Amino acid sequence: MKANKILDVLDQFKDSHYQKVLINGNWGIGKTKYVIDFIQNYSEACYVSLFGKKDVNSIIQEIYFHILDKAPSGKVKKLMNVLREKMNTLDVSYFGVSLSIPLIANIHKNLNKELGSIKNFVIVLDDLERKHPELDIKEVFGIIDSLSKIEKIKIVLIAATDQLEDVDRETFINYQEKAIDRIYKIEEYADEAPIQILGNSIWRVLEEQINALDFNNLRTFEKTSLFIEEVLTVIEDKYFTDKFTKDDLYRMCFATVFFNIEHNGELRLLDGEANNVEYMKAYYQESENGTIDYLCNFIIQNSLDNVLSKGVFHFIKKWYETGAYNKESLIGAINTINNYKEKTHNFYSSDQEILGVINRTVERIKQLNGSESINEIIFEVSTAISWCEILSIDFDLSNEEILESIKKNIKKKVDVDQNEFNIWEFHTDSPKALSLVESIYKSIKIECFNRLIKKIIECYEQKFYEPLHLKELTQLIEQNPEITIIKEDLLTVLSTYKYLFPFPSGKITEKQWGWCHRIKKLVITIQRSWQIENYYVDFKNYVNDTAVHQSIEDKMLQHRLKELFKQ
């Protein structure tokens, strides 16, 4: 039965001879939503969630006050006096079914008498599987049985019985026949539910992919809708074009949510022979690129308007999974797609169309003059190489030829004041393209190293002790210890300029003192990252020995060096 049929079931139930029914269905299928809709249209009903309830008392008291809430304001005081009088005669610590149910019957009888009501009162008990472990299911069934014996009171129990723990499941199976008159099984969400949650514009885009997937959790749609709304607060309408479409954003957001919520980040859609499945898992799990390919191939079934949108998919996935995103890099990736010179191509393009893209890319690389954006060059070349692998042809330029062609562009790219460069701006499922991107990335890092060293020497010579560049150089070495090509150059500079250490003698500035600490950190990092034995000890000995010869009477210098070299 579909979830929207709950409205018909409850409408018939309120006037039927059934006293206690169960509505059973998986989490997120829409049970509670349609029960609440019924209650909003039928005044003689109340809703009580068993979530976290650990004793009968808390359930009964909530029912009391729901019944009282139905009374007009003028009747409440009189009914409250009746309730208070009754409760004063009870020992609350032993406030169980046998004492409390008659009290509900009394209150309900008084209320019906005052209002002249002839309708049946429906009490809905939801979330059976979410009750506290201390509350026994037999106690819940006891409440249901006792309440159902009160004239004009009917009980609806809502549960996802497949979520019951082992002991509770066994108890439920043993007692359900006696405790429940009728069970209704909800197996599908209502046809209109996804449209109502997502809205027509999003549903139109996702309908085909959603219908191809096997799941019944409406919360996945709710989470998708909320995530899309969150992303659209950052990616404004002006960034959407015929190359980077809002439809592709919807697809990426849905695939990310579905992958994490429905499949718990597992590759569950792979099928076939066991050996082949294991091989495919290894491929898709090898890198973040592989996971993105899985989402595109199996969840949204290669439906992206533009295959280049994969370059944004990494940001979307990380955003959902961690809550973190770099707006500048995200928008930069979108702009790179929008600035791409070729027309949009995707899974449905022909060989001839793709060959045209590849050939035009080769010609553009040969004609670079240094003014072009390095981001857009990498994006275009890596895309063309990926297409080459799909068509089983070679790209006409080697990595070395490409690196030579973009030397000027790399120099323009590097700014020692803004030297961040994110390799994941360029999605590729091609090992050859990834190799090229990594080579370009390495060249940019080396250029950045060289620029920083030059800038640091200038600051040292001019006694302009701005420590920012030292900090950046140290971080680059820490994060890229494998790039040793600049090792000899840097060690030569530090030897020539005596570690670039400005002795803190006499009156000094805060920045000079900060520079001293940064040089110390740089030396330690060099020793650790490049495994140069005793490099820090040699530095420390040089500083202390030189200080003694320079100014043995400068007590503040001696004091500062002791502070600097404290462990």
Image (spheres, helix red, strand yellow):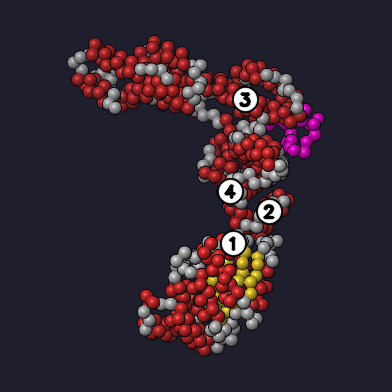
Q: Nearer the viewer, residue 332 or 535?
A: 535
Occupied quadrant, residue 277: top right
The residue where tag 1 is placed is 162
The residue where tag 4 is placed is 264
Provide the secondary structure element on which disc 4 rests: loop
Q: Earlier in the sequence, mark 4 or mark 2?
A: 2
Q: From mark 2 to mark 1, how far is it between C-alphas?
A: 18 Å
Q: Which of marks 2 and 1 is nearer the N terminus?
A: 1
Q: From mark 2 to mark 3, how far is it between C-alphas?
A: 38 Å
Q: In this view, does 101 lie to the left or right of 342?
A: left
Question: Could you say where residue 241 lies in the image, as x and y percent from the top left?
Answer: 68, 40
Q: From mark 1 to mark 3, how far is it between C-alphas?
A: 49 Å
Q: Earlier in the sequence, mark 1 or mark 3?
A: 1
Q: Nearer the viewer, residue 199 or 111?
A: 111
Q: Give the range drawn in magenta.
A: 340-355
Type of residue at label 1?
A: Asp
Marker disc for residue 435: 3
Seen in the picture, residue 399 relative to 334 is either above or below; the reply is above
Q: Which of marks 1 and 4 is nearer the N terminus?
A: 1
Q: In this view, does 545 lie to the left or right of 490?
A: left
Type of residue at label 2?
A: Asp
Provide the secondary structure element on which disc 3 rests: helix
Q: Is residue 344 magenta?
A: yes
Type of residue at label 3?
A: Ser
Provide the secondary structure element on which disc 2 rests: loop
